[in-house]
Amino acid sequence: MHLNIYPFHNFVTVFTRSMASKTQVGFVGLGNMGNPMAKNLLKHGYPVIATDVFPETCKEVQELGAQVIVDNPAEVAEKADRIITMLPSSPNVIDVYTGPNGILKKVKKGSLLIDSSTIDPSVSKEMATAAENLGAVFMDAPVSGGVGAASSGKLTFMVGGAEEEFTAAKELLSCMGANVVYCGQVGTGQSVIEQEYFLTNTNNLTIGMIGTSETMNLGIRLGLDPKLLAKILNMSSGRCWSSDTYNPVPGVMEGVPSGNNYQGGFGTQLMAKDLGLAQNTATNTRTPVPLGSLAHQIYRMMCARGYANKDFSSVFQFLREEEGQ
């Protein structure tokens, strides 16, 4: 006769984990978003064990005291029972969790695995099942907010997973975000992000950025000084985030990617991926998004023309090159 004692065991695991404050936390994926997120964990006093496929990205967190392991998520899982992953896409998540050196190769029973990547909800559910089979807990916690929010610790996390694990997850996520919202079972975090974030923020960001780039480019071609043009825009009804906070024209603003050859910020390839997910959601719900579809096409063309690793505001440069300048 098999007695199901999981609820009691689950209670003990949750209680133990809640008392494990300031124990080691694993972090996999130190890109533009993951790097500042891991730094905020360190700032809050958590010992961090970090790894990334590109070892050079680990340098900054190592200097701040993190233990760095060279491209081996399995070794991270061997040393930490709370792990956060922040990766570019669904295939990356699958590889980091289930690949030859994946987390699930060495994961300990009772471990809490939090994935903040923006991926297909079905992949989150698949990873959760694989983790559960090994006695671990997987939660999806994708974020709303860009690199600036990641750096300032003001991200919004949409969390999906077992409700009894939410408190333990929130303890860590609150170090990196201003809002941590429980959305339901595994995959719901991704679903909320798709429906709310992609179809609003992503489409708005890219459509606004393309519009600002077109406007600035037209004004420059008419002989206007770009700084003066931006000033006029920002005093009028044309003012928007892309014009007053993240202007895409080099030399107009300091501290933005356009002033640094479009390095840093949010990559064009990632934006194209996010727009693709938004398009899938729109198709599945039969929602017309013609401008979002056109933005997706533009960012896919940019990836094919060498802009994949540049910030998405490089659409201004892309448009300039398209006209032969």
Image: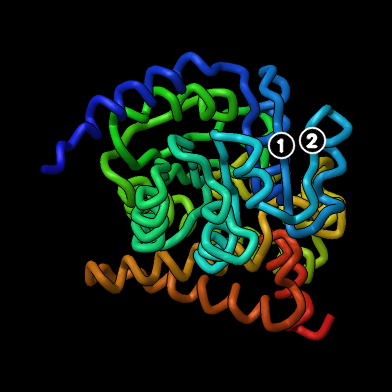
Place of residue 112 in the rendered image (x, y in percent of width and height, measured from the top left) = 47, 36
Q: Image check: 264 left or right of 273?
A: right
Place of residue 319 in the rendered image (x, y in percent of width and height, measured from the top left) = 71, 75
Residue farthest bottom in this picture = 324
Q: In percent of the image, x 65 and y 52: which residue is there?
A: 73
Q: Is residue 157 above or below residue 117?
A: above
Q: In percent of the image, x 71 and y 47: which residue is there?
A: 30
Query: Which quadrant is the C terminus positioned in?
Result: bottom right
Place of residue 136 in the rendered image (x, y in percent of width and height, measured from the top left) = 42, 42
Q: Is residue 95 above or below residue 82?
A: below
Q: Is residue 285 above or below residue 192?
A: below
User: Considering the numbered disc 2 on the image, is that residue within a helix, a strand or a loop?
Assistant: strand
Q: Name the residue carrying label 1.
A: 49
Q: Is residue 40 above or below residue 235?
A: above
Q: Image check: 212 left or right of 98?
A: right
Q: In percent of the image, x 62 and y 18: which residue is there?
A: 22
Residue 244 in sight from this viewpoint: no
Q: Within 10 Å of the Cα at label 1, are there few (<14), some (14-19), or many (20+) other Cα atoms? A: many
- Image quadrant in which you'd find residue 1: top left
Q: In percent of the image, x 78 and y 79: which residue is there?
A: 321
Residue farthest front in this picture = 1
User: Considering the numbered disc 1 on the image, is that residue within a helix, a strand or a loop?
Assistant: strand
Along the line of sight, the residue nearer the viewer: 283 or 109:
109
Q: Name the residue carrying label 2.
A: 67
Q: Are marks 2 and 1 in contact (CB under 8 Å)?
A: yes
Tell me which numbered mark, 2 or 1, is placed earlier along the sequence: 1
Along the line of sight, the residue nearer the viewer: 134 or 52:
134
Amino acid under label 2? Gln
